[in-house]
């Protein structure tokens, strides 16, 4: 059961060492995990069964507290290979986490650090021992919640002050977080996808050059680009069209990222409009999809609860196929606002919301979901080949098969 507004939920039998205080005054008690302190953020829920480390290090979760619906989090520990933010020193990703069960000692041959210590190292505040199903139901009924998450091993909290902070927090709307999570400098990426018992490799002889604008890019996106034969030059979120074109790219990539797309669009959209005019193949994911939509004249809107998980069904209208995908977004492109000449290519089968678009007559397309997975299914990996086929077409090279025969 969720606690009634302005009352404390009696969900623990010992003195709580962590609290989740919702903006309406609801106080949820738990056991503190990870870093200490308090931070304001939006509470969402994620339905993935695996990949908690990738989720917590996804820069698209900046400004958010992730409630995991899967009860057992931390049982495989953490390692240095499953981090998704490009510059871990920035600690881009979720600021808080909520678990049902206590974090256990890790039991996995790849484990290097206990989740509790890893959370401490990254400055992520978490609490365990609460009814995450009740919290998830609350979010589904009333929408994503503004809140404060606090952890103090002594159990001493200034509850009135924390409630005031939760009620006063402005939320994610009108908030540009891409500037906070971008790497902020130009770099070159050549690491290719992970392989069992060998780890990551390096693309030594790239045939193509992709310029990626980093609004909060995930490492596995860059790995999949490199794995198809590309050197990837990563530019900061504030890169201009001139900055991109100075690198003479074969393709342009617009990355995922956090915050309100309309706020990031203030500086990103003018650059993207110029890049569209060049006819260089362009591909966007997540926030990059929303940036492209805004540049083409569409609108974005805040979602009721957002889409967060690794089991979301999406239909590709260009093939008629349904795939299960990873999702992580609290804003969406308004399908009704897509202008003439912009085709809707993908939709969510949960709620019919827009999940993809392409520009007629141009080598330009994007998707809302995360085809790189990490975590999640690999049903949508074909989209990277679709992007490279646009590049190969311009070079007069034969197309790659988008999917294997098994797919």
Image (spheres, rainbow, N blue to C red):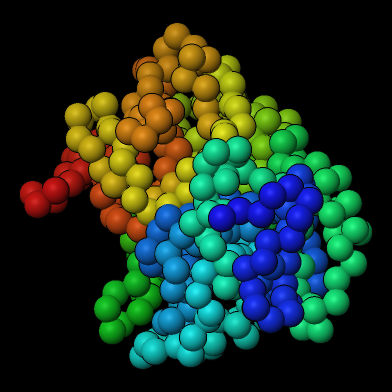
The extreme top residue here reads 340
Q: Nearer the viewer, residue 3 or 85?
A: 3
Q: Is residue 292 visible?
A: yes
Q: Is residue 130 left or right of residue 160?
A: left
- How many marks on residues? 0
Where residue 272 appears, as percent x and y from the top left, is 59, 31
Q: Is residue 292 left or right of residue 215?
A: left
Q: Nearer the viewer, residue 127 or 312?
A: 127
The vertical placement of 265 against 129, above or below, is above
Q: Nearer the viewer, residue 227 or 85?
A: 85
Q: Is residue 331 left or right of residue 395?
A: right
The vertical placement of 77 against 357, above or below, is below
Residue that appears at 53% across and 60% down: 132
Q: Quadrant of residue 225?
A: bottom left
Residue that appears at 43% across and 28% down: 353
The vertical placement of 324 against 28, above or below, is above
Q: Is residue 102 left or right of residue 9?
A: left
Where residue 237 appears, as percent x and y from the top left, is 66, 46
């Amino acid at each position: 059961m969720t606690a009634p507004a302005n009352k404390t939920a009696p969900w623990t039998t010992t003195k709580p060492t962590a609290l989740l205080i919702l903006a309406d005054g609801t106080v949820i008690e738990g056991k503190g995990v990870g870093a200490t302190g308090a931070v304001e953020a939006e509470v969402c829920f994620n339905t993935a069964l695996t990949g908690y480390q990738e989720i917590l290090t996804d820069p698209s979760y900046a400004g958010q507290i992730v409630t995991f619906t899967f009860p057992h989090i931390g049982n495989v520990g953490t390692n240095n290979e499953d981090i998704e933010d490009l510059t871990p020193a920035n600690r881009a990703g979720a600021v808080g986490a909520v678990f049902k069960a206590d974090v256990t000692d890790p039991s996995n041959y790849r484990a290097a650090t206990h989740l509790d210590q890893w959370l401490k190292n990254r400055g992520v505040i978490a609490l365990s021992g609460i009814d995450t199903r009740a919290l998830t139901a609350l979010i589904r009924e009333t929408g994503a919640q503004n809140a404060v998450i606090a952890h103090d091993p002594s159990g001493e909290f200034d509850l009135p002050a924390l409630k005031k902070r939760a009620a006063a927090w402005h939320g994610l709307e009108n908030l540009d977080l891409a500037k906070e999570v971008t790497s902020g400098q130009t770099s070159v990426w050549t690491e290719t996808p992970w392989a069992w018992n060998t780890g990551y490799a390096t693309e030594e002889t790239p045939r193509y050059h992709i310029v990626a604008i980093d609004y909060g890019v995930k490492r596995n996106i860059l790995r999949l680009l490199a794995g198809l034969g590309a050197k990837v030059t990563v530019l900061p979120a504030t890169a201009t069209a001139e900055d991109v074109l100075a690198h003479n790219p074969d393709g342009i990539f617009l990355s995922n990222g956090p915050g309100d797309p309309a706020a990031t669009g203030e500086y990103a959209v003018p650059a993207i409009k110029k890049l569209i005019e060049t006819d260089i193949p362009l591909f966007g994911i997540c926030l990059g999809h929303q940036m492209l939509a805004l540049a083409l004249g569409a609108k974005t809107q805040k979602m009721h609860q957002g889409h967060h998980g690794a089991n979301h069904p999406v239909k590709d209208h260009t093939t008629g196929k349904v795939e299960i995908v990873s999702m992580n977004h609290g804003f969406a492109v308004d399908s009704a606002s897509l202008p003439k000449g912009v085709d809707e290519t993908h939709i969510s089968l949960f709620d019919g919301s827009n999940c993809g678009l392409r520009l007629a007559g141009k080598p330009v397309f994007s998707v809302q979901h995360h085809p790189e997975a990490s975590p999640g299914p690999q049903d949508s990996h074909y989209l990277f080949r679709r992007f490279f086929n646009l590049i190969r077409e311009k070079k007069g090279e034969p197309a790659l098969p988008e999917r294997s025969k098994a797919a």
